[in-house]
Amino acid sequence: MSEKSADAAAKAATGSADPHLPALYAHHRAAFAEVMARQKNGPVDRVVKTIVAAVETRRPKRRYVAGSDARALGMISRLPAGLRERLITSSFKLSKVPSGAA
């Protein structure tokens, strides 16, 4: 999902909400947008090769992992919830966002 479509989806989801509620998360959304703006897309070659291999094989696997990001996300998903949340929060620099800030 692109940054523009994610922003449009967020606006649509919060459009009918009480205006005070989305304001509670404005700092969080801004911090997340800042991190996403710094993200760089990697080369697609590895993903393309993985997809071709999956399509051409006689007995495909249930899941394929293409790229180090996908591998890392798979490992993160297996962590205990508290540790996973702290890791994600610090990665997206949300721990510096004041809680309940509006």
Image (cartoon, rainbow, N blue to C red):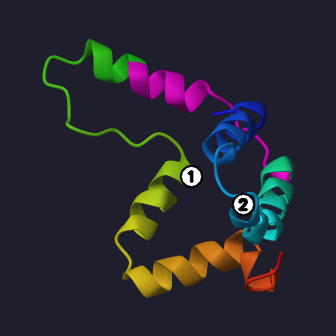
Amino acid of disc 1: Asp
Verify CB contact (< 8 Å) between mark 2 and mark 1.
no
Q: Choose top left, top right, bottom left or bottom right for residue 59.
A: top left
Figure quadrant of the C terminus = bottom right
Judge whether 36 appears above or below 96 on screen: above
Which region shows up in magenta? 38-51
Element assignment for label 2: helix
Residue drawn at point x = 65 percent, y = 76 percent: 89
Q: Does residue 72 appear to the left or right of 29 in the view shown? A: left
The alpha-carbon separation of the residues under discs 2 and 1 comes to 30 Å
Q: In this view, does 100 lie to the left or right of 61?
A: right
Please state if 9 lies on the left or on the right of 24 as rendered: left
Q: Name the residue under label 2.
A: 22
Please provide percent x and percent y for residue 79. Answer: 38, 77
Q: Who is closer to the viewer here, 95 or 48?
A: 95
Q: Name the residue under label 1.
A: 69
